[in-house]
Image: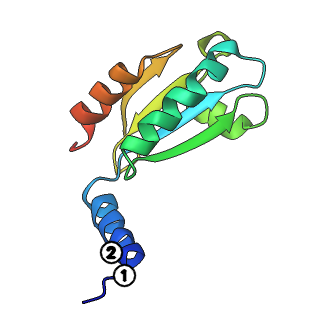
Amino acid sequence: MCVNHTKALNYLSAALYNACAMKVIKIGAEWCSGCIVMRPRWQEVEETHPWLITEYYDYDTADEVVEKYGLEEGKLPTFIFLDDNENELLRLSGEVTVKKLTEVIEEYKDR
């Protein structure tokens, strides 16, 4: 029996996505050293949580997002965790460990 692994993985990913639609809004800037530090950390988190939806916005160009979430320049990077109805669950700012990000995701994923 031949199995199309790509199709099976896509099906599984879609099922996981539908089961948990947590989203994280990541806001940073090119000139922000903490934002640079966080890029590989988020990459690791996103690889271990493929169902997690993340969106990155640049503080200097995404005026609507910055205004919508009431961000201040001194609070970068900022990570806003949203439920599937776009309600804010939690907000973190600054350099955060992979362990802390994972703990937050696991705590809030079913809300």
Residue 77, position as x, y percentages in the image: 59, 20
- Element under disc 2: helix
The outermost residue toward the top is: 74
Question: Image height check: is 34 above or below 68?
Answer: above
Q: Nearer the viewer, residue 34 or 72?
A: 34
Query: Which amino acid, by three-letter code, is at mark 1?
Result: Asn
Residue reaching furthest bottom? 1
Where is the C terminus found, in terms of image quarters? top left
Q: Circle 2 is placed at which residue position?
A: 8
Quarter of the view holding residue 1: bottom left
57 vs 20: above or below: above
Circle 1 or circle 2, nearest the eye: 1
Examine the image and state in which quarter residue 90 appears: top left
Whether the residues at callouts 1 and 2 have beta carbons within 8 Å, the answer is yes
Q: Which residue is mark 1?
A: 4
Q: Give x and y (percent) for residue 39.
A: 59, 29
Identify the amino acid type marked 2.
Ala
Q: Is residue 14 left or right of residue 29?
A: left
